[in-house]
Image (cartoon, grey):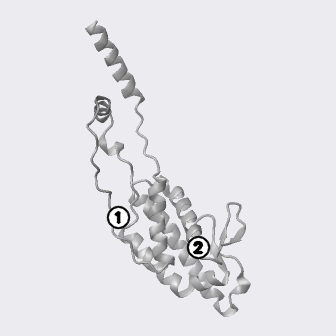
């Protein structure tokens, strides 16, 4: 009987090892929180956020045998929930440029309704008639610079987290964040690309 139990246990363990799939998923909640902090320091009067850090470890209940078996089968590095790292020297440089550009040019354009946030995390001219002819070249240059920085930001965050394949999801998360943090009266594109006023 004991031999049968060992054979069954070994068979189950082999089956479990064969079925364990290590899947690193995109941490959407962590990404949204990081995006909100970043966006807040650009378009609100907030200060730069504190350094990104992992939460303090919490005490756990004593490990059960099944949990100990899983710990043996799945390396600890893959069992942890991934976190999103937003602060790097490159992203801090981008943040500085975006903040300065917002204060010097973009805020006035957003307040006037001339530009708005696009559904893909960029900015675009919504109504060129609201930009004085003498200021259009400067406005277009500011929009081009802003979009170049936003594209670089999304790419850098994905790279800094070791998952370049996350760039589209990071862009989507930031796009949602820009729209949610938009001030009253600013314009944004809905999912269909139509301009809406906040």
Counting from the top left corner in percent of width and height, residue 173 is at 53, 60
Work out whether residue 144 or residue 71 is closer to the camera in this orientation and state it. Answer: 71
SS class, disc 2 = loop
Counting from the top left corner in percent of width and height, residue 111 is at 63, 83
Work out whether residue 37 or residue 131 is closer to the camera in this orientation and state it. Answer: 37
Residue 191 quadrant: bottom right
Dot 1: within a 10 Å radius of its alpha carbon, few (fewer than 14), some, or many (20 or more) residues? few
Q: Which residue is mark 1?
A: 52
Q: Residue at x 65, y 70 (%)?
A: 188
Q: Which residue is mark 2?
A: 182
Q: Residue at x 32, y 57 (%)?
A: 55
* 154 sits left or right of 84 in the view: right
Is residue 65 placed above or below 49 in the rendered structure? above
Dot label at residue 173: none
* 177 sits left or right of 88 in the view: right
Quadrant assignment for the N terminus? top left
Is residue 104 placed above or below 38 in the rendered structure? below
Marks 1/2: CA–CA distance: 24 Å
Q: Residue at x 53, y 87 (%)?
A: 104
Counting from the top left corner in percent of width and height, residue 105 is at 56, 86
């Amino acid at each position: 009987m004991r031999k049968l139990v060992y054979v069954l246990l070994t068979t189950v363990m082999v089956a479990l090892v064969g079925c364990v799939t290590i899947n690193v998923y995109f941490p959407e909640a962590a990404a949204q929180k990081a995006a909100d902090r970043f966006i807040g320091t650009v378009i609100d009067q907030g200060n730069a956020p504190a350094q990104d850090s992992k939460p303090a470890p919490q005490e756990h209940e004593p490990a059960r045998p099944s949990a100990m078996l899983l710990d043996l089968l799945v390396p600890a590095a893959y069992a942890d929930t991934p976190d999103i790292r937003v602060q790097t020297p490159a992203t801090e440089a981008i943040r500085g440029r975006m903040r300065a550009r917002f204060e010097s040019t973009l805020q006035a354009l957003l307040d006037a309704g001339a530009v708005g946030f696009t559904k893909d995390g960029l900015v675009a001219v919504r109504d060129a008639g609201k930009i004085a002819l003498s200021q259009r070249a400067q406005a277009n240059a500011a929009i081009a610079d802003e979009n170049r920085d936003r594209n670089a930001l999304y790419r850098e965050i994905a790279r800094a987290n070791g998952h370049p394949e996350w760039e589209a999801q990071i862009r989507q998360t930031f796009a949602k964040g820009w729209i949610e943090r938009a001030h009253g009266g600013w314009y944004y594109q809905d999912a269909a690309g139509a301009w809406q006023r906040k």
